[in-house]
């Protein structure tokens, strides 16, 4: 029997630690083992196998902080979405706000695609190949293993990343036997999910095929509109719909050749509404609203809402050839993502009945340009009205990557291991947009306050081209001395990076586009390094130190399409917050790892310090003068500009696990991270021009009034000498996991599982005092029964047992709009102030039932 199979036997039972123990997740659990003997084996070893250093080794042997989530945990704790994994990994946050914005934070540093572009602070991998976070942040199924490797990455795997990397693997086909299974969940929050797999060996122990898929339905963040929901065509309930299928093949014709190929297609689409709260609840003296909306009402004032769609195709191949004590490995991947969004522009809800005459209207794109609104509106079945105006976006991105590496399997001279390799990554990321008019936006619809009629909005098309190519070579050496007690390791990666971006505007039918930013190739190169030392005082206790550097090319921020006061482009100040210099960083980490109670317990702790130069900080949206076309008057818009700032991060991380009894496990995990900007310069709202960001500012919507608050010739304000946190995520977070199992009959057992999470206090953005959050703890509880050898299981659960709810963020002011009346009094415009402002809150309590069945293995 292969050692891999023996290791994987542990996956069927919960053990302790950052993850309940799982070895190599791709293999199947042997069917002949008794569940209780498996449990005893796990308790005896309490071992987690990881591939953080591109070879399989025990988590306790890696001189680095690595957090693991196993397939067992995902199923046991009903983690239905990839973003749910953050519940088990303190210090990690993962969110998605649209088709194009999947964000992650770890060690006090945030990855925001709009600020970082293709080069993230956290690198993401699927089956060892680099992958878009948009693809990962979806429903999980046929889960293998998740590893978060904290700290600078890149000398051993893929791209350079300053904060860490997330490596996710799917289950590989089992060469030894036929198997099938499914998981199903239903909840009181209208979530419905079912996933399953079928595995068949085509040639026993040589070739196998695995087919897996998922169908997932829910109501997103549960925010619905107060508008006429009786007309489902106009204002239906929010929804998320995901379906995906994956085919995997595994081929091992000899003991020295192993090949794996995976192809996956995924489609998801959704409808959402911007949540609001009555302004009178936050601004004393403001008029009381006609309909009071409180934070946990989960209501919106939007008509029709916003829509998103994602279609992904991913092909990944892995090949390993072993010879003469060496291993030659290749990883190749091709992915295509076709993402689209229809984002509502009228968040203030000015264009609503009875103020206007509400009527149907068609989507109309500029002739001679891509019909983004017409095409994407037709795909989601959206027929807009005179009360809804959209920015329609379509992005069809392609990525192709190749990595080849040679590594030692047997030590050279008995003490030296090496890895050398090369990496090539090419990304094409074009986008096409149509902007319709919206209050205060570009091409604002003309409103007649006498008749209530709304003229068709002006439109413009936006054409963005973007591509990048990275070529790099890397190497790593590891030497061991004094009977393997002392280990020294070091690595380098040389990076050559080239990118090219261009931006143009279409302003009239059949007119040539106006180039805002021409395509100019940029080339740069850099070398990064890592070095580590560890010393084992015994087999159960070791200490280590680690230093590493990282580098990211400066991003080209997209989203501000102003042509500037003179029609030739943005001002120099705007460009300084759009085209950023390269980021560099250096990190230092020390830690200790220990096991005790004959492997039944584990305690790991680490501390780190990291310095950044030119970190791309994306703060709250700030007002600026927006010129939509040459000769067009300015309007006051807002945009999340990005500033290159110095940042220092300090933190501590720890985990403890205990197998208290043969059938009772307990683990605790905690993280503290404090990232701070040090004397930085950022774009800001500074209406009084005192050099400091204003708090709870009410920005004038009249362009002349706003311009009077700026320095002459400027379109936005900037503030210097800034010292503040680099992210709004909590400094401290922790979780506790536990399970107790007991016999009901000879063939039936029961269990109780629990997961408690704690998010520490956070002050949010300093520009507003309304989104400060107190510490919050939640408890998820599971109870159920399972059959012999864990072949089936049924459980009931409640998430957020004590129904804890918190406000995450609140808009800085009431929603506002400047509406064009085409010369009609008063003053050609209406300065509209809504009775509401935006709000974001935590998820509601959820009750549900889950069931799973496995036949012939997993």
Image (cartoon, rainbow, N blue to C red):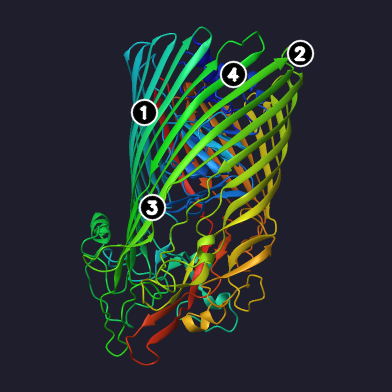
Q: Residue 70 vs residue 44: left or right?
A: left
Where is residue 390, by image quadrant? Answer: bottom left
Q: Nearer the viewer, residue 436 or 34?
A: 436
Which is in the foreground here, disc 3 or disc 1?
A: 3
Q: Earlier in the sequence, mark 4 or mark 1?
A: 1
Residue 72 position in % (x across, y down):
51, 30
Label 3: how many Cα within 10 Å (few below 14, some 14–19, many 20+): some
Q: Which residue is mark 4?
A: 418
Note whether 435 is above or below 58 in the view shown: below
Instruction: State how far apart marks 3 and 2 are (Cα).
Output: 57 Å
Taking the spot 53% from the left edge, 14% from the top edge, the residue there is 6
Q: Earlier in the sequence, mark 4 or mark 3?
A: 4
Which is in the foreground here, disc 4 or disc 1?
A: 4
Which is in the foreground here, disc 4 or disc 3?
A: 3
Q: Tag 4's secondary structure?
A: strand
Instruction: State how far apart marks 3 and 1 are (Cα).
Output: 36 Å
Which is in the foreground here, disc 3 or disc 2?
A: 3
Q: Earlier in the sequence, mark 3 or mark 2?
A: 2
Is residue 621 visible in the rendered image? The answer is no
Q: Which residue is mark 3?
A: 519
Note whether 812 is above or below 80 in the view shown: below
Instruction: State how far apart marks 4 and 3 are (Cα).
Output: 41 Å
Taking the spot 51% from the left edge, 24% from the top edge, the residue there is 421
Q: Which residue is mark 2?
A: 482
């Amino acid at each position: 029997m292969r050692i891999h199979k023996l290791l994987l036997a542990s996956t069927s039972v919960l053990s302790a630690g950052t993850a309940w123990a799982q070895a190599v997740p791709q293999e199947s659990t042997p069917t002949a083992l008794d569940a209780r003997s498996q449990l005893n084996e796990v308790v005896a070893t309490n071992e987690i196998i990881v591939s953080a250093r591109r070879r399989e080794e025990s988590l306790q042997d890696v001189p680095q902080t690595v957090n693991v989530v196993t397939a067992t945990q995902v199923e046991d704790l009903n983690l239905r979405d990839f973003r749910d994994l953050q519940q088990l990994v303190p210090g990690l946050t993962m969110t998605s706000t649209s088709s194009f914005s999947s964000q992650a934070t770890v060690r006090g540093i945030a990855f925001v695609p709009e600020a970082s572009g293709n080069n993230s602070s956290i690198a993401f991998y699927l089956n060892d190949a680099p992958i878009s976070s948009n693809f990962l942040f979806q429903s999980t199924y046929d889960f293998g293993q998740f590893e978060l490797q904290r700290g600078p990455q890149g000398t051993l795997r893929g791209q350079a990343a300053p904060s860490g990397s997330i490596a996710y693997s799917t289950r590989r086909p089992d060469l030894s036997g036929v198997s099938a299974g499914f998981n199903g969940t239903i909840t009181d929050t209208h979530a419905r999910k079912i996933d399953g797999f079928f595995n068949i060996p085509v040639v026993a122990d040589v070739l196998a095929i695995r087919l897996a898929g998922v169908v997932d339905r829910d109501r997103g963040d549960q925010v619905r509109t107060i508008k006429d929901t009786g007309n489902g065509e106009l204002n239906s309930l929010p929804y998320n719909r995901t379906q995906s299928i994956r085919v995997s093949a595994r081929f091992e014709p000899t003991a020295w050749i192993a090949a794996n190929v995976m192809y996956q297609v995924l489609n998801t689409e959704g409808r959402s509404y911007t949540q609001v709260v009555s302004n009178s609840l936050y601004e004393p003296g403001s008029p009381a609203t006609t309909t009071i909306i409180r934070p946990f009402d989960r209501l919106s004032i939007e008509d029709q809402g916003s829509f998103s769609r994602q279609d992904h195709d991913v092909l990944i191949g892995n090949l390993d050839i072993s010879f003469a004590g060496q291993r030659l490995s290749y990883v190749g991947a091709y992915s295509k993502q076709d993402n689209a969004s229809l984002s509502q522009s009228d968040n203030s809800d000015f264009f609503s009945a009875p103020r206007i005459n509400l009527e149907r209207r068609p989507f109309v794109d500029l002739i001679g340009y891509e019909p983004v609104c017409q095409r994407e509106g037709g795909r989601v079945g959206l027929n807009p009205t005179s009360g809804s105006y959209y920015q329609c976006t379509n992005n069809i991105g392609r990525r192709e990557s190749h990595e080849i590496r040679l590594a030692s399997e047997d030590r050279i001279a008995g003490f030296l291991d090496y890895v050398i390799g090369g990496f090539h990554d090419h990304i094409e990321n074009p986008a096409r947009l149509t902007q319709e008019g919206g209050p205060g936006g570009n091409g604002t619809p003309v409103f007649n306050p006498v008749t209530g009629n709304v003229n068709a909005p002006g439109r413009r098309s936006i054409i963005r081209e973007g591509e990048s190519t990275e070529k790099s070579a890397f190497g790593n050496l590891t030497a061991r001395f004094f009977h393997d007690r002392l280990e020294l390791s070091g690595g380098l990666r040389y990076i050559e990076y080239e990118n090219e971006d261009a931006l143009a505007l279409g302003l009239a039918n059949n007119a040539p586009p106006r180039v805002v930013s021409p395509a100019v190739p940029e080339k740069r190169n850099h070398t990064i390094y890592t070095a580590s030392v560890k010393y084992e005082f015994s087999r159960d206790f070791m200490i280590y130190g680690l230093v590493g550097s990282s580098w990211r090319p400066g991003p080209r921020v997209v989203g501000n399409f102003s042509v500037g006061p003179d029609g030739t482009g943005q001002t120099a100040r705007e460009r300084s917050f759009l085209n950023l210099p390269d980021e560099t960083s250096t990190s230092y980490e020390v830690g200790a790892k220990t096991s005790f109670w004959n492997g039944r317990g584990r305690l790991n702790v680490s501390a780190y310090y990291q310095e950044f130069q030119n970190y791309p900080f994306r703060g709250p949206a700030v007002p600026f003068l927006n010129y939509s076309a040459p000769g067009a008057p300015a309007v006051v818009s807002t945009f999340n500009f990005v500033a290159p700032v110095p940042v220092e991060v300090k933190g501590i991380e720890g985990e403890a696990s205990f197998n208290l009894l043969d059938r009772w496990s307990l683990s605790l995990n905690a993280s503290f991270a404090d990232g701070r900007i040090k004397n930085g310069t950022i774009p800001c709202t500074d209406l009084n021009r005192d050099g400091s960001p204003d708090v709870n500012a009410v920005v004038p919507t009249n362009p002349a009034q706003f311009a009077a608050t700026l320095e002459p010739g400027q379109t936005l304000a900037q503030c210097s000498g800034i010292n503040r946190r680099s992210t709004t995520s909590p400094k401290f977070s922790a979780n506790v996991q536990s399970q107790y199992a007991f016999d009901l009959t000879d063939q039936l057992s029961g269990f109780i599982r629990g997961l408690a999470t704690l998010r520490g206090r956070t002050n949010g953005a300093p520009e507003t005092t309304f989104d400060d959050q107190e510490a919050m703890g939640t408890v998820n509880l599971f109870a159920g029964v399972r059959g012999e050898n864990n072949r089936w299981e049924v459980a009931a659960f409640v998430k957020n047992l004590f129904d804890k709810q918190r406000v995450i963020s609140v808009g800085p002011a009431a929603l506002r709009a400047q509406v064009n009346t085409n010369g009609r009094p008063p003053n050609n415009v209406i300065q509209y102030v809504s009775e509401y402002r935006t709000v974001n809150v935590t998820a509601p309590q959820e009750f549900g039932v889950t069931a799973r069945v496995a036949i012939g293995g997993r």
